[in-house]
Image (cartoon, rainbow, N blue to C red):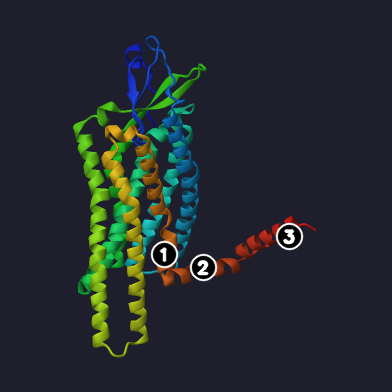
Amino acid sequence: MGVIPTVLTYAEATNLTFIDLWNGEEERTWTGRGGQGQVAECEPLYTNLSDPTAATARQVKYVAYGVVLPVLVCAGVLGDVLNLVVLTRPNMTGAAYIYMRGYAAASLFALLCAIPFSYHVLTHEAGRWSNYYVAAFHAHIVLYFGNSCIGIGVVMLLALTVERFVSVCYPAQARTLCGSTRAHVTVAVIPVAAFLLNSPYLFLAHVAACTSEAGVVVHVKEQSRWLLESVWFQVYKWVLEVMLKLVPTLVLVYLNVRIIRTYKAVCEKRRKMTKKVSGEQRRQYAEESRLMFLLGGTSTLFFVCMTPMIGLSLTIHQRWKHSLQFQIFRAMANVLEVTNFAATFYIYCVFSKDFRDTFLRTLRRAKESPVGMSFLGSVSGLRDAIKAP
């Protein structure tokens, strides 16, 4: 449900401010002139385009959000689609793979949310749209849906790590605590909880209308000051940041250290107690080892890529955020966060032999299918047509 564009009175339009919290931009003001019942006139939002620092900041944004981020998003979307294809094969069973499917789906949607984010940073930082519904989409949906998907991905990875921790460190309780039914319920509950927890972001901004210099009525995203400046919302933001970023990062580090130590001790004990190992046991040990390395690689990537974003979230409201150094740090943190969600398929391919084998079998079957053969024939024919005679 959209918000009806606001018609501003003279008193309201003479001193309006809005802050783009997601982009970490400085507070901008726009003022309007108009009588009662008239749409306010938009004023130019940029007054320092000749500033060398502002020019450098624009170059940083172009490289980060116009070059690097689109490449990561394309590679990540392709990888996450392949993740879902491979992880839904019949042989990819077990609770760990259920959590991996949930994490891949959350990563895919988080990457898709980066597309309107980059577009907004590069072309619409003035925050003006001719179409009300596009403005409402940016005001209500982009930040809410993006934060929710990031939170879902973080908790999915945490659930996967807890499942591996119980399986390795407490194998006697693993059958009871780590079954497929429990995993399916957990994967279903996590998105619902994440969307509910992030629901205040639906009301963080609303759409207002003003008249541009060309005399055209445009729509702007205006922050809801009553919500933004309330004490409970400030507390809510910090609690959510701690719950969905800081605490999961620390828990992941701790659990992975415990998993690695316990797994090494178990392997050493097995070697001492068992002189002959059956083929089935050998395959089971190898699968556990691959899952451990896969989890370790994913968790390490998460820690490296998400730590700068935690620092950004804790310092984004400080006065020095307007400096060029902070703009560079902000761009780097955003790029690293996208990298975390874009690299999962490639991490799985590196550390999981079963995943690689299933992926290659899926490719061979797709190649042998009528659709695949038709596609390859079209590509081959196009290649022959392009070749010079």
Q: Which residue is mark 2?
A: 362
> Can residue 352 be seen in this snapshot?
yes
Q: Which residue is mark 1?
A: 348
Nearest to viewer (mark 1 / mark 2)? 1
Secondary element type, mark 2: helix
Nearest to viewer (mark 3 / mark 2)? 3
The numbered disc on residue 181 is: none
Q: How far across and down, in percent of the image, does residue 295 sit?
A: 33, 64
Q: Which of the 4 image quadrants contains residue 386?
A: bottom right
Q: Cα distance, mark 1 to mark 2?
A: 15 Å
Secondary element type, mark 3: helix
Q: Residues within 10 Å of mark 3 (few under 14, many from 20)?
A: few
Task: Residue at 29% x, 54% y: name it.
Answer: 155
Q: Residues within 10 Å of mark 2 (few under 14, many from 20)?
A: some
Q: Residues within 10 Å of mark 1 (few under 14, many from 20)?
A: many
Amino acid of disc 3: Asp
Direction from residue 240 to residue 385 in the image, left or right? right
318 lies above or below 180? above
Q: How far across and down, in percent of the image, does residue 29 sit?
A: 36, 22
Task: Residue at 36% x, 42% y: name it.
Answer: 329
Direction from residue 230 to residue 96 in the image, left or right? right
Dot 3 or dot 1: first in sequence order is 1
384 lies above or below 112? below
Task: Residue at 23% x, 48% y: name it.
Answer: 243
The numbered disc on residue 384 is: 3
Secondary element type, mark 1: helix
Amino acid of disc 2: Thr
